[in-house]
Amino acid sequence: MDDDRRVWPPDSRDPEPPWNPQLRRTARRSDPEPRPESLPPSARLYGAPAAPRRAVGRWRSRVGAVLALAVAGGLGTGLVVMALRQAVPEQAPAARLVDAAAGVAIPLPEGWWQDPLPPVTGFTSAARSAGGALVMARPSDPPAAAGSALAPAAKATAEAATLYARLLLHGDTVTVVDDRRITVGPYDGHTRSLRAEYKDVVNRPAYLRVMLLTKPGSSVVVVGLLQPDETASRHALDAVMTSVRQTP
């Protein structure tokens, strides 16, 4: 092959020194292109490789879309975690939860505080504990008696427990652990408690309690949520829920 047609490898007689990459700056910031001696042999022949385009904006938009979908469709097991895992406020905890819309107040023990924004739509107040428990309240219409062999409060409580278990728990197995009539302060009503268990190893059992309390002129729904479901934590949650009182 003629010397003027040789492309690679170069003739050993060529005066060009071998490429020796080192960690040093070979081109000033103002230079539009790197100098030839700072490039490997292939780049000298075919040109310097172009810097990859940054896709930060594109990935940020994709992350935003994923988060939006998670919020819109996150009514599965992850919703329990989202509802329960919130930052502990820096201010001193409130002495009690007050719900003017429902007309009730709940004394809060040490380690509890009133949440400024209930995490589930429809509820008008909420309180959390440092141990991961959640209590929510909302006003309710008086239970209707027609169309069921059950007492009106028992039927309405069962329907509400089924609804919130489907929205908040999504357990692989959901078991009724308590279902009875109760009296709390000036209210009569019904309570129903569920325990959800999961086949995966990530989600620990969860506990959901629903109370429907009624008295002449008003009704209120109180919901308690706990994960993981442990005996001591469950008793503490039940004690808070059954301390509901009517506001003056």
Image (cartoon, rainbow, N blue to C red):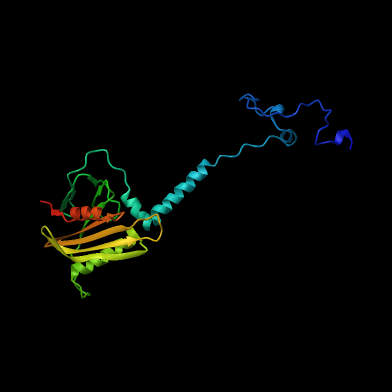
- Residue at point 33%, 48% (across, down): 85
User: How many callouts does the rendering have?
Assistant: 0
* Residue 241 placement, left or right of 67: left
Front residue of this view, candidates 240 and 51: 240
Question: Vertically, is 106 above or below 36?
Answer: below
* Residue 26 placement, left or right of 138: right
Front residue of this view, candidates 214 and 87: 87
In terms of image quadrants, where is residue 48?
top right
Question: Vertically, is 158 above or below 149?
Answer: above
User: Residue 15 at x, y = what percent?
Assistant: 81, 25
User: Residue 95 at x, y = what percent?
Assistant: 17, 44
* Residue 67 placement, left or right of 97: right
* Residue 27 placement, left or right of 16: left
- The quadrant the N terminus occupies is top right
- Residue at point 22%, 39% (across, down): 92
- Residue at point 48%, 46% (across, down): 61
Front residue of this view, candidates 102 and 161: 161
User: Residue 124 at x, y = what percent?
Assistant: 23, 52
Question: Vertically, is 179 above or below 94?
Answer: below
User: Residue 144 at x, y = what percent?
Assistant: 19, 69
Q: Residue furthest front?
A: 231
